[in-house]
């Protein structure tokens, strides 16, 4: 059965092409415009030829997000295409999970939208997600049962934390474990700067 988000996507692109995006309003260069339009074509062709081929759709959306990041126009672009925030969010969450766990591609792209949302929640750590992916569990109920201990731990910590959400660290841990060798140095530099800012804040208290 087609995922709910896929049904929404089908309705959004039921016309022959995506509604035209106003690149000039966001001062998008001709080079980036050409790149986005190339991904748009792939996006439409992938959906029309392979309605269940989530991989290509997620890949194209992720690429457009990367291209338009500097201009901050990604939301405006996908809204002009008739896509909703929730729809795009699920596609990108699925793509991020695949990037974290490429060995489990088939399972990730067969899970329901609800399952993807659960596995992408900040309260769920890297190891917890992997523990689900290595099993045969695919239904939301089964996944919730497997993640029950982690969700309970998150709930307990949330009660204790008045000012900060320490579970964001779990999200950072996921990212670190998935970084490519050439990305680690840049990540380390940004993390060092982040820690420095926190230390400065501590000194002001």
Image (spheres, rainbow, N blue to C red):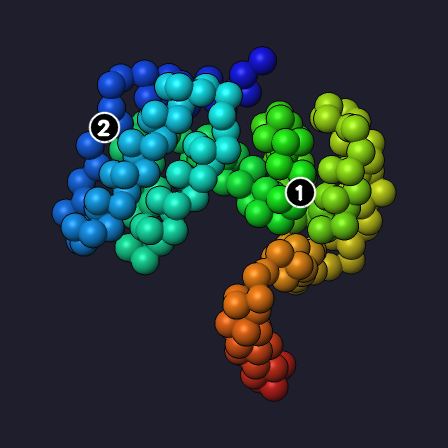
Q: Earlier in the sequence, mark 2 or mark 1?
A: 2
Whether pointer 2 and pointer 1 mark residues with C-beta atoms closer than 8 Å, the reply is no
How many marks overall? 2
Answer left or right for 79 relative to 30.
right
Q: Is residue 25 visible in the rendered structure shown here?
A: no
Residue 77 in the image, given as x and y percentages of width and height: 29, 39
User: Which mark, by number, is residue 117?
Assistant: none
Residue 199 in the image, given as x and y percentages of width and height: 61, 82
For disc 1, the neighbor class at 10 Å (few under 14, some 14 to 19, many from 20) is few
For the residue pair 76 and 134, the one nearer the viewer reads as: 134
Q: Residue at image x 79%, y 28%? A: 136
Q: Residue furthest bottom?
A: 203
From what the image shows, is residue 190 above or below residue 87?
below
Q: Is residue 100 visible in the rendered structure shown here?
A: yes
In the rendered image, which quarter contains the C terminus?
bottom right
Residue bearing the label numbered 1: 103
Residue 112 sits in quarter = top right
Q: Residue at image x 40%, y 31%? A: 84
Residue 187 sits in quarter = bottom right
Answer left or right for 75 relative to 151.
left
Q: Residue at image x 39%, y 45%? A: 63
Residue 50 in the image, given as x and y percentages of width and height: 44, 20
* Distance (Cα) linking label 2 and label 1: 36 Å
User: Which mark, by number, is residue 19?
Assistant: 2
From what the image shows, is residue 190 above or below residue 27?
below
For disc 2, the neighbor class at 10 Å (few under 14, some 14 to 19, many from 20) is some
In the rendered image, which quarter contains the N terminus?
top right
For the residue pair 156 and 16, the one nearer the viewer reads as: 16
């Amino acid at each position: 059965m087609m995922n709910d988000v896929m049904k929404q996507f089908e309705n959004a692109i039921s016309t022959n092409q995506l509604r035209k995006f106003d690149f000039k309003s966001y001062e998008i260069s001709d080079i980036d415009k050409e790149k986005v339009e190339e991904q748009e074509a792939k996006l439409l062709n992938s959906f029309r030829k392979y309605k269940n081929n989530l991989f290509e759709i997620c890949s194209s959306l992720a690429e457009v997000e990367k291209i338009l990041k500097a201009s901050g126009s990604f939301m405006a672009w996908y809204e002009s295409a008739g896509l909703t925030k929730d729809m795009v969010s699920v596609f990108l969450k699925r793509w991020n999970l695949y990037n974290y766990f490429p060995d489990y591609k088939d399972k990730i792209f067969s899970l329901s939208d609800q399952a993807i949302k659960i596995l992408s929640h900040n309260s769920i750590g890297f190891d917890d997600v992997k523990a689900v992916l290595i099993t045969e569990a695919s239904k939301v109920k089964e996944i919730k049962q497997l993640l029950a201990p982690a969700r309970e731990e998150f709930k307990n910590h949330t009660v204790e934390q008045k000012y900060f959400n320490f579970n964001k660290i779990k999200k950072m841990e996921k990212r670190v474990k998935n970084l490519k060798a050439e990305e680690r140095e840049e990540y380390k530099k940004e993390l060092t700067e982040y820690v420095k800012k926190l230390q400065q804040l501590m000194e002001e208290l």
